[in-house]
Amino acid sequence: MHSIKSYSAKQIPSVMNHIGTIWQSERYDRIIRSQQEFENVYKYILQNPVKAGLSQHSTSYPFLWQATLSGR
């Protein structure tokens, strides 16, 4: 994780003319122990753009790649 954050923090400002912090200082790692927990986390992540007001529905958010869960 450190390598990804370090590299991208150096590259993003030069490509996007961005000044300031790129990454938050904390990260939240967790082990997903069951299919049900995976589905709950997946659904939570899908709703992030909607909660942030970036999209009316998660499926219309252009930067969120989505796969089906167990053929659902």
Image: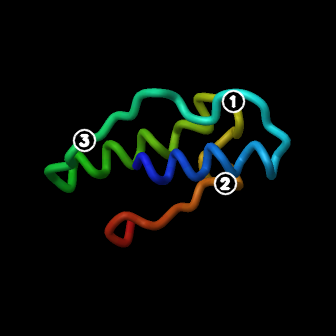
32 vs 69: above or below: above
Of the residues shown, which amino acid type is indicated by label 2? Phe
Q: Earlier in the sequence, mark 1 or mark 2?
A: 1
Q: Residue at x 43, y 66 (%)?
A: 68
Query: How packed is label 3: few (under 14 Cα within 10 Å), some, or many (20 or more)?
Result: few
67 vs 53: above or below: below
- Residue holding disc 2: 63
Of the residues shown, which amino acid type is indicated by label 3? Arg
How far is the residue under mark 3 from the one under mark 2? 23 Å
50 vs 36: above or below: above
Label 2, secondary structure: give it.
loop
Do tag 3 and tag 2 residues touch (Cβ < 8 Å)? no
**Which residue is at the far right?**
17
Coordinates of residue 60 in the picture (x, y in percent): 69, 52
Coordinates of residue 36 in the picture (x, y in percent): 21, 49
Do tag 3 and tag 1 residues touch (Cβ < 8 Å)? no
Q: Nearer the viewer, mark 3 or mark 2?
A: 3
Rendering quarter of residue 35? bottom left
Please give left or right for residue 11 compared with residue 1 in the image: right
How far is the residue under mark 1 from the one under mark 2? 14 Å
Q: Nearer the viewer, mark 3 or mark 1?
A: 3
Coordinates of residue 28 in the picture (x, y in percent): 34, 34
How far is the residue under mark 3 from the one under mark 1? 26 Å
Of the residues shown, which amino acid type is indicated by label 1? Gly
In-front residue for pair 13/47: 13
- Residue holding disc 3: 30
Query: How packed is label 2: few (under 14 Cα within 10 Å), some, or many (20 or more)?
Result: few
Which label is found at residue 53?
Answer: 1
Q: Residue at x 42, y 39 (%)?
A: 44
Label 3, secondary structure: give it.
loop
Q: Earlier in the sequence, mark 3 or mark 1?
A: 3
- Tell me which colouring the rendered structure shows: rainbow
